[in-house]
Structure formats: C-alpha cells, structure tokens
Amino acid sequence: MKKNKWMLMTMAVILLFTAACSDNDGPSYSKTALTNDALKTILTQKGFQFDDQGRLLLDTKADTTTELDLSGTKLDTLELKGLSVLPHLTSVDLSHNGYGPRFDFSLLPEQIKSVNLSSNDIYEYPGLVNIQTAENGDETVTVLHHLTKLILPHSAQYNCVEIPTYFAQVKGLDMEMQNAAGTLKPYTTLRDVPDEATRAYLKEVFPSVFTGDQIDISKRLVKLTEANANIALSKKYIPSTSSTNEIKSVEGVEYIIMNPGYRGGTIFIDAHDQCVLPYIATNLFMNQFIISKVSTNLLNLSASTRLCCFSITSNDSIESADLSHCTLMGTRDKMTEFDIGDPSQITLIRCPKLTSLSIPKTAHILGGIDLEHLPLLKDLNLSTMSYVQDLALQDIKNCKLTFYEMKMPSGWTWNPFFSVDEQTYNRPSVKAFLDKYHSQFQCSPGPADPDSGGEFYDWAADYK
C-alpha cells in the first residue's frame, strides 16, 4: 500500500513538471496589452508581433530592443505611454513628428532615459520638473523624469523655465539643441541680442542677466529695480549708449518677459521695421501688453489673469488671441475703468492671419474694442458684455458678429462711440444693433487706421 502511494505521488510530480515544461516551451507575451492601434501598427511594421489581445510577443527582438526610431511617424504624444510594453526600451527618437507647442514628458514611460525631439516646434516642456516658488522667491525643484540624454529642437531656446532648470538640476546630462540651421550643438543658456539698439536698452534696464552682450536665461531677476521695471522699447526710449534709434530686431526681449523673476506690469514694443518673436509667454503681473510691428507665432497669455489692456498692430503671423484667462479685464468698477484713465481694452489691427479671438466671459464693461483689417477672423461674440465705450469694427468681412444688450454704467453720462466701415454697417446684425441703440451712440466718421487708407462710415446720417 505504501509502495502504491509513493508511485502515485511520483507520477503526480512528473505530470506537474511535464506541464510546467510544456508551458515554458510555449511563446511568452507581455502582461499588459497594447490597445493603441496606431502604435501597434508602427511596431508591427518594425517586426514586433502581437497576439489577438494586443499582447507583445516577448521574443528575441522584443527582449533586445533598447532603442526605437519613431521619427517622422507623427505618432500622437498620448500614444507614447504604450512604449512601456517594450521591456528594455530606454531610448526613443521622436524627431520630425510635428510636435508642439507643448511636449509633456509625463506621457513617456519612466524607463525612457534618452529622447530625441529635434526638428519639432516645441516651446513648453511640462513633466520634466516641478518648481515651487516661496513668497520670498526661493525655489524648490523636483525632477520628475530622469534622463541621461536629451536632444532639443531649435524652438527650445525660447524656453526659460523647464529646460534651463532641468539642465542645472540633472548632473551628467548630455543635452544638445539645434541651432537655426538645424545643426546640433551642446546646450547653453546664453542667448544673443543681435540688434544694437535693443541690446543697449536691455543692458541698461536689466544688467544683471547679461553675460557680456548675451542674456543668460539661467539668471533670475532678483533686484527689485529690474524685476519690477516695465518694458518700453521704441525709438523714443533708446538709451544714449546706442549709436542708432532704429529697432530692426527685438530678439532678446522675450527672455526678459519670460524670466521667472520678472514682475513688470507693462510691455510696450514699437519696432521701426517688422520684427519676429516666435514665442512669448506672459506672466501673472502683466497688466498692459502693447506691441506694434512684431510678429508673434505663439502668444501664451494663460498666466496673465490681471491683463486688462491688450493691443497688437501689424502682426503678420498671429493666428489666435486667447484672452479667456484674463479674468480682471472688464470686471473692474466704473471709476477704475474710466475715471482714472486705465480702461480695459482690446485692439487688434492688421493681423491678416488671425482667425480666433476669445474674450473673457467675465468681462462686461470695456473701455474699447478696436478690430480692424482682420480678414480671417471667424467669430466675435460680445453677448456677455453690457457696455463698450469705444467700439470700432472695420474689414472683418468673414466674421460672425454677436452683439450685446447695452446697459449704461450707473452714473455714466458720456455716450459711447460706435465706428464701422460701410461694408460692416450694411450687415443685418449691425443694423439691428444700431436700430436699437443708435440714439445712445456717437458716430465718428472719417479716416480709421491711418496706415490702411480705410474710412469709417457716417452711419448717423441714416438715422436723422
């Protein structure tokens, strides 16, 4: 009996061992399935194999792949999380993928230690570091994604927060950045200010961030006289140290505006010739932003909740103006808005590529809205407003207009102005608005924008 028991136990062990060997001899797959079809298609084309559930076959190719070339695939950044399916992947090439203006490093698996982002238009890099600033200005930095190698596009030169901070924090990091010609160079925090007049002005007002004739974006503005200084850059405000007062380039100003220590409330730039600033992000302290003859491809106003005066003229590249975060605009009392000469106002003139304008939903009283020569603007919704002191509309032929129910501010006795060109006046929505409120408006016919040759229409004559 004992012998039979021993034989049965021996056979059971043999069967279990045989079954285990059988399982080990079969194919092995990843524990998690890749549900993203786009990434799975790309990996399949590169020779990786998946079962019907989307699990990766852990064959020799999968087990030995440490680098992956995804350049030119246009893979959505949200799909990058799926790269964790490759067990030993540490390096990924994401160049030429049309990424921008943001690249979120939190979407990359933690195992990725080397990233190539060259030949993209990326300006913002969340997910690299977390920066907490105390009331006294002290910063506490936490590195969120540890890398050993990072290749950046040329547009990264305009990043004044995440990239220079990361560069200073991560020791032994191999970081390169493309120059204007696309050639990779070792990353540096020094930035050129090519125009003599602009350089002379910035060196006089903000000397502490300069190293020679270059701005060092790793330096924080800490002196109150510099940190709180407004920027007023035009031929009228150039210091005597410059041999010219013609501003042909304003490159370099953006590095002051985006310096984490900058607290200035007013930006005023009036260039002599058409200039280009590819990217600007304004700060919490901005109250007035006025630029003329400066083309800005990307303008990030999301932090400027206190911005009340916004004016852009002759901007050849701006496509959208998002003022939705400017929650102070148009919300102040009558005395602040009108009596002390600091009205909220929106001016956009000669911006041929502008398609969208977002006005804060909280705004209800504005000192002025002046929109002229915006042929591609699609929509102007003023329905949340109750009063605009000076409303001017010209050459916005493709724009859908939604007007407001006008309510005069309490105690206000001045009639507002309403100015339109004849083509705009003949639109049904404009006539309906004037039929209701023409007696409360003043008409200001005659020349409009002095550089355009256009004229406002004498609509008041039709109501006599």
Image (cartoon, helix red, strand yellow):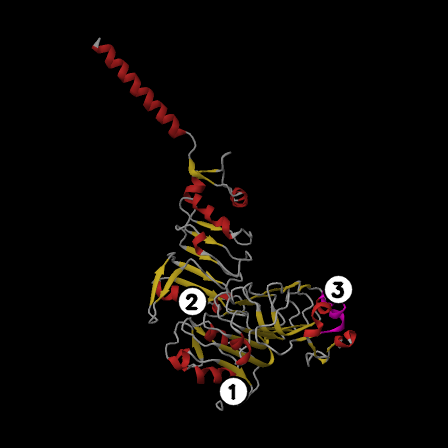
* Residue at the spot of label 3: 428
Quadrant for the C terminus, please: bottom right
Residue 241 position, x and y percent, is 48, 90
Residue placed farthest to the top in the image? 1
Q: Marks 2 and 1: in contact by CB < 8 Å?
A: no
Task: Identify the secondary structure beneath mark 1.
Answer: loop
Q: Amino acid at mark 2?
A: Val
> Is the C-beta separation of discs 2 and 3 under 8 Å?
no
Task: Determine which residue is flagged by label 2.
Answer: 161
Name the residue: 45% across, 77% down: 264
* Residue 162 in the figure: left or right of residue 440: left
Q: Is residue 113 above or below residue 211?
A: above
Q: Tell me the quarter of the picture where residue 445 sits.
A: bottom right
Residue in front for this viewpoint, 438 or 4: 438
The answer to whether residue 252 is visible is no
Looking at the rendered image, the disc whose residue lies closer to the viewer, 2 or 3, is: 3
**Disc nearer the start of the sequence (2/3):** 2
Q: CA distance from mark 1 to mark 2?
A: 28 Å
Task: Provide residue 276's location: percent of width, then percent of height.
Answer: 57, 74
Residue pointed to by mark 1:
238
Give the alpha-carbon distance from disc 2 to disc 3, as whole Å: 49 Å
Q: Which residues are magenta?
A: 420-432
